[in-house]
Image: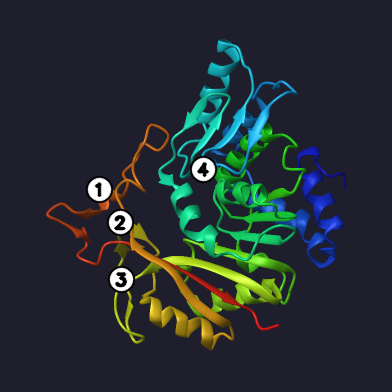
Amino acid sequence: MAIPAEHRPLYRAFIDQGLDSWLARLPEQLARGLDRKRYGDLPAWEKAVAKLPDLPEARDVRLDVDTVTVDCPLDDSRRRQCENLLRKLAPWRKGPYRLADIHIDTEWRSDWKWQRVSPHLAPLTGRRVLDVGGGSGYHAWRMAGAGAAFVLVIDPSPRFYYQFQALRHFVGDADGGRTHFLPVGIEDVPERLAFFDTVFSMGVLYHRPSPLEHLLQLKDALRPGGELVLETLVVEGDATTVLLPGERYAAMPNVYFLPSSLALCQWLERCGFVNVRVVDEAFTSLEEQRSTEWMTFQSLADFLDATDPKRTREGYPAPRRAVVIANKPA
């Protein structure tokens, strides 16, 4: 079976990285993740990316700055064409980006999260990194900008896949082809892979009905001694405190377990992680998550109690996020 041109870089990367056990699964995973019968809007997203005009070879790409930036000269007509096509991929959740003077002001100030996380990481230079639930890839581009040798985003959303492909169109090969996207979930990563030097799971754990199973899946993907970077919703409390919300939490469905950071550390230790430490914990501000012209739906301000911003509209504690770093035993 011929490999579509847009998938060839991913296949080459898997071959170069020696991911033979996963390589054989790629055709089925890509076909399922990009199935037009499952996702009615997928053809429109695919068409939007395909219509992006050719860009000048000379461009200045910055993956090591808060706003991921691609500077290249475009006339007004092509710039308007690019902006209109990028808007067809909205809502844009994670960023920000500036692409040929088009500022994509995303719902999340993901650069603020990166500022909180990055000082605590083992240096990413030369490392193989998995970003679980990475959205459009903002953090993955930052990881590449920090020197990672191979970055793989996995996220089952085809919209995020096409946002990533649009960004790839602008970035070109400025990252040396080190950054890739596969539209699958963590459950599709081969068991006991033991490959990645660093695994990120940010904003995923609270959506998992079996959180310890998720932690074990992340551990399976890590090489011995590898580093887990876990960011998730938490609540204040002691090592026995865990919140199980009702049908919705801050208007989000499918939110299951919100532990205290102390309880979360115990979960990690129970799963066999070592050197477990909380490196950051804070409430999410209205400036960090908000509606913009690139994400026009409701956002955090709409999900909080109008009379008490320290509580959600369902009456639960307002979103509070912790970053925990741990290691798989060597």
Is residue 21 depicted above or below 112 in this figure?
below
| Res. 66 mark | 4
Q: Residue at x 81, y 63 (%)?
A: 19
- Of the two numbered discs 2 and 4 on the same chain, state the one appearing first in sequence: 4
Disc 3 is placed on an element classified as loop
Classify mark 2: residues with Cα within 10 Å, few (<14), some (14-19) or many (20+).
Answer: some
- Mark toward the start of the polypeptide (3 vs 4): 4
- Residue indicated by mark 2: 251
Residue identifier under label 3: 245
Structural distance between the alpha carbons of marks 3 and 4: 34 Å
Q: Nearer the viewer, residue 3 or 193?
A: 193
Which mark's residue is nearer the viewer, 3 or 4? 4
Q: Are marks 1 and 2 in contact (CB under 8 Å)?
A: yes
Q: Which mark, by number, is residue 288?
A: none
Q: Position of residue 300 (x, y in %)?
A: 30, 50
Going from N to C along the chain, the mark reached first, 3 or 1, is 3
- Looking at the image, residue 223 sits to the left or right of residue 327; the answer is right
The amino acid type, in three-letter code, at marker 4 is Asp
Residue placed under numbered mark 1 in the picture: 302
Spatial separation of the CA atoms under disc 1 and disc 4: 26 Å
Q: Earlier in the sequence, mark 1 or mark 4?
A: 4
Q: Secondary structure at mark 2?
A: loop
* Amino acid type, callout 3: Pro
Q: What is the three-letter code of the residue carrying label 2?
A: Ala
Q: Quadrant of residue 278?
A: bottom left
Quadrant where the C terminus lies? bottom right
Figure check: 136 above or below 273: above
Q: Nearer the viewer, mark 1 or mark 4?
A: 4
* Relative depth, front residue between 41 and 55: 55
Mark positioned earlier in the residue sequence (2 or 3): 3
